[in-house]
Structure formats: C-alpha cells, structure tokens
Image: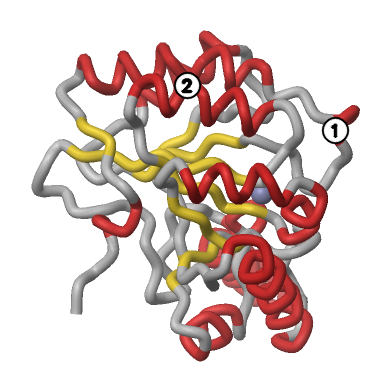
Amino acid sequence: MLLTALLILAGFGLAFGLWFWWACATPSSTFFRPVLVRGPQGGKRVSLTFDDGPSEQFTAQILDILREHHVPATFFVCGKNVERYPDLLRRIVAEGHEVGNHTYSHPFLFFKSRKRMAAEIDRTQTVIEQVAGFRPTLFRPPYGARWFGLVPTLLERGMHLIQWSATGYDWKKDAAGITRAALCDLKPGAVILLHDGRETRRASEIDRSPTVQALADLIHGTRRQGYTFAPLKDFLPTN
Ligand SMILES: [Zn+2]
C-alpha cells in the first residue's frame, strides 16, 4: 500500500518535472505568454534572427551576405558585446536590420529574481540607446530559457518576448548540417535562430565560420521552397 502510494507520488513528481522543464526551457513552449514562437501562417514568409553578437569578425561577414542577397534580419545583441563593438551595432541599424535585446551578460534566467532580470534588460536597453539612439522592443532570453517574472518585466517596458521555431543548431553543426537542419524546420511563419557571436566571449574564443559558410545556401534553399524573408516586426500581432 505504502509502495503504491510512493510510486504514484513519484509518477506525479516526474510528470510535474517534465512539464516544468517544457514550460521554462523548451523554445516553442507558450506557457509564459504573450510570446512569439512563430509568425502568421497565412503566407510563405519566414524571419531570420541572429543571437549573441555583435562579434568582431563574424557579424560583418554575415551583414555582407545579407546585403548581397537583400535579406532583412533581426540581431538579438548582448549589451556587453555592444559596448565592445558599437560600430557593428550602428552598421546593423544602418543596413535596415532590426535589433533586439538579449540581456547584458547572457545569464541563464532560471531562478533569477525580477530585479536581476530587469537589471540585465535595462542595462542593455541603455547601451543600445547610447550607441544607436533607440530602445528595442524585442527581447530574446539567453538559451530561450524563461523564468517567473520575466514576462511582467517585459510588459512593463512595452517589450515582446521572442522565441524561435526553426534553427540550424549552429552551436554544434558544420555548414552543411546547419543548412539542412534549418531548411528541414521551415514552415510558414518560421522564426529561424542562428548566431553571429557566442554569448559574451572574446573574439579569440568565437568561431562562427560554419554559420557564415551556411548562410548563402540557407537563403537560396529557403527561397527555392517558395518562402520570402520578412522582418520580425511583420510577425508581431497588430493591435
Ligand atoms: Zn544567446
């Protein structure tokens, strides 16, 4: 009897743990709302996003490729990296791309207080404003990980929580693998995650050349499937 009760309890515990992990850590989870995981599914539009930059070498190369192919993108930047490379942020903006906030120091937000999350967000907003003259309204949490209090903190600031629905897994795959994985995940309204930096690491610790190598093929492959690239602002709910 006691054993049965313990097993039932363990079962509930496991189910709760799995649900909790899904809610906080799965990029596509909609437990914390409002959130944008995927854009409108009516047209064949997708949106390209780059996290963790700017980085000295790779952001410029990615911007060159985007310009050559006339593709708009969104760069979710870390405040600390913007302080290092303000000119790259200015170039992102000058070339018509969108900028989002990706925290100052790229922490896991699990178990972080509202005060700490707000400090990470606000410090980055200030850095971006000093460099580029505006405060972004888009936010993506590091690792896609959300925590209680994040959404109210964003809503207070008029900011949107942005996740993603497709990725090239460019933190672990080579160029061909990145292209294949991203194209495989494409659906109308897909928000595609790639990286132009690596957290807030220094230039010598970053190699985003697989992403750079994959990008043109990924763009061609996406267009061959009949999709067009839209800016993320076109995917936000209008009200
Ligand atoms: Zn990141």
Query: Which residue lies at the image location 43% right of the left edge and 15% below the top edge?
Result: 216
Q: Which residue is mark 1?
A: 203
SS of the residue at dot 2?
A: helix
Q: Is residue 205 left or right of residue 42?
A: right
Q: Which mark is residue 65?
A: 2
Separation (CA) of disc 1 from disc 2: 20 Å
Which residue is painted at 55% across and 27% down in the image? 62
Where, by quadrant of the figure, is residue 1 drawn? bottom right
Q: Is residue 17 above or below residue 63?
A: below
Please state, as top left, top right, bottom left or bottom right, where the C terminus lies in the image: bottom left
Does the rendering let one see residue 4? Answer: no
Q: Is residue 119 above or below residue 138?
A: below
Q: Position of residue 11 (x, y in %)?
A: 60, 65
In the picture provided, is 60 more to the left or to the right than 107? left
Is disc 2 surrounded by few (<14), some (14 to 19) or many (20+) residues within 10 Å? some
| Amino acid type, mark 1 | Ala
Q: Nearer the viewer, residue 97 or 52?
A: 97
Q: Is residue 76 visible?
A: yes
Question: Toward the viewer: 186 or 129?
Answer: 129
Residue 107 picture location, percent across and down: 78, 61
> For the point 15% across and 37% down, which residue is it?
44
Q: What residue is shown at x 41% (from left), y 39% (from top)? A: 48
Is the C-beta of the residue carrying label 2 under 8 Å from the nearest atom of ligand 1?
A: no
Q: Is residue 188 left or right of residue 130?
A: left
Ligand 1 closer than 8 Å to label 1 CB: no
Along the viewing direction, whichever of 233 and 148 lies nearer the viewer: 233
